[in-house]
Image (cartoon, rainbow, N blue to C red):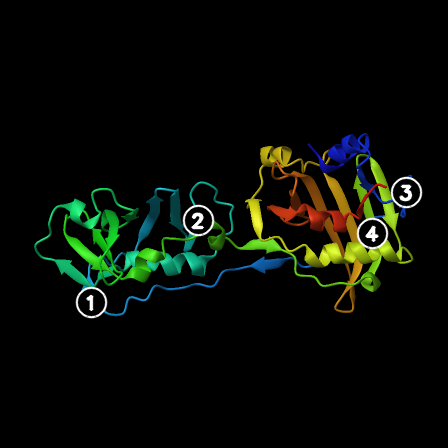
């Protein structure tokens, strides 16, 4: 359900949030800005190679990886090495952070251990009967490799076993490199603007078939909208490459979404900004789906920020 539909329903109860009447309704709709679009910010997590100091026992040295699969109690991920690039096998269009992923992958492609348990007890003693993490790698020259990672030892390193059944200890930071949020592997589209009302030349908001236009003279509205733009810095995402059904579910299709368009000054130059707002992203109505023009990603933003961006006001 779209925010503005919920707002309309709420109006009957006398607590409606509506598009502010301070703006000017545009019958035919204003002309679309011809100014260059604002450049989107790329959120890129820093690569963090595992500290393998002291790991002198070479176990693997894979030069031609094909698949890199990772499993834990929470997730299963499959990645492929194709033409010099790591890709998500489930959605090849997702822009992976190559440095971030490769820093993790190389620790296992070039796997070295700290120690080898010469008289290994049963796997249960090392937590390897039900491993916390499993890495499965296929290599063009050396075939398949399974790496099971179990408990930590007293020094914080992990026990690991391979197909040969031997038990090793590997650096703690290497095992910890598998504990990550998928979000950190993706190059995400966001905004990083800090504007004031004086930077805004015009704002056009379209919702439910109605269009409202704000001009610089609408000082109060422009101040609120500028705050919304400055605070809109998506960090969470519902989709990294939205397909048509995802746009439908998020109510971000052309016929369902609310559209925010602004012409503003950025670093002394005139730019255009378009943001699409969909439905609520949670049952409480505190989060909304948003999409930045020029991006295939669906972000999640606080409703409080979206209400400033769209200049939604509480009715008296």
Where residue 187 appears, as percent x and y from the top left, is 53, 55
Q: Residue at x 74, y 68 (%)?
A: 267
How many other residues sit within 10 Å of disc 3, few (<14), some (14-19) or many (≥20)? some
Judging depth in this view, the residue of 63 and 217 nearest the camera is 217
Q: Quadrant of the C terminus?
A: top right
Q: Earlier in the sequence, mark 1 or mark 3?
A: 3
Q: Residue at x 39, y 42 (%)?
A: 74
Q: Earlier in the sequence, mark 2 or mark 3?
A: 3
- The span from disc 1 to disc 3 (Cα, nearest Å) is 71 Å
Residue denoted by label 4: 203
Can you tell which quarter of the image residue 216 is in? bottom right
Query: Is the residue 196 above or below the residue 207 in the image?
Result: below
Q: Is residue 203 left or right of residue 6?
A: right
Q: Residue at x 81, y 52 (%)?
A: 33
The reply to whether the C-beta atoms of the residues labelled 4 and 2 are less than 8 Å apart is no
Of the numbered discs in the image, which one, if any, rests on residue 26?
3
Where residue 72 appears, as percent x and y from the top left, is 34, 44
Q: Secondary structure at mark 1?
A: loop
- The span from disc 4 to disc 1 (Cα, nearest Å) is 62 Å
Residue denoted by label 2: 87
- The span from disc 4 to disc 3 (Cα, nearest Å) is 12 Å
The reply to whether the C-beta atoms of the residues labelled 4 and 1 are less than 8 Å apart is no
Residue denoted by label 1: 56
Q: Residue at x 57, y 47 (%)?
A: 237
- The span from disc 4 to disc 2 (Cα, nearest Å) is 39 Å
Q: Secondary structure at mark 2?
A: strand
Query: Is the residue 213 above or below the residue 63 in the image?
Result: above
Q: Earlier in the sequence, mark 4 or mark 3?
A: 3
Q: Quadrant of the N terminus?
A: top right
């Amino acid at each position: 359900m779209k925010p503005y539909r919920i707002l309309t329903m709420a109006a009957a109860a006398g607590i409606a949030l509506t598009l502010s009447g301070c703006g000017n309704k545009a019958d035919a709709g204003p002309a679309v800005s011809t100014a260059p679009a604002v450049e989107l910010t790329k959120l890129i997590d820093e690569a963090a190679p595992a500290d393998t100091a002291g790991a002198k026992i070479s176990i693997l040295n894979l030069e031609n990886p094909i698949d890199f699969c990772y499993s834990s109690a929470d997730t299963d991920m499959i990645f492929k090495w194709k033409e010099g690039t790591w890709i998500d096998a489930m959605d090849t269009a997702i822009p992976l952070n190559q440095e971030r992923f490769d820093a993790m992958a190389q620790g296992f492609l070039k796997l070295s251990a700290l120690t080898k348990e010469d008289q290994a007890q049963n796997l249960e003693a090392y937590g390897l009967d039900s491993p916390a993490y499993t890495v499965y790698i296929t290599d063009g020259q050396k075939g398949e490799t399974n790496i099971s990672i179990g408990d930590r030892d007293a020094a914080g390193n992990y026990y690991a076993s391979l197909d040969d059944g031997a038990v090793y200890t590997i650096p703690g930071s290497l095992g910890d490199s598998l504990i990550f949020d998928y979000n950190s592997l993706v190059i995400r589209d966001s905004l990083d603007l800090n504007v004031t009302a004086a930077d805004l030349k015009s704002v056009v908001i379209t919702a439910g078939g109605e269009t409202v236009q704000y001009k610089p003279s609408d000082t109060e509205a422009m101040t609120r909208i500028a705050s919304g733009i400055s605070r809109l810095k998506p960090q969470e995402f519902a989709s990294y490459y939205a397909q048509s059904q995802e746009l439908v579910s998020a109510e971000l299709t052309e016929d369902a979404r609310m559209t925010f368009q602004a012409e503003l000054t950025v670093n002394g130059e005139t730019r255009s900004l378009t943001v699409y707002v969909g439905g609520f992203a949670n049952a409480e109505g505190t989060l909304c789906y948003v999409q930045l023009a020029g991006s295939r990603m669906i972000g999640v933003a606080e409703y409080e920020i979206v209400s400033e961006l769209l200049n939604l006001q509480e009715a008296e």
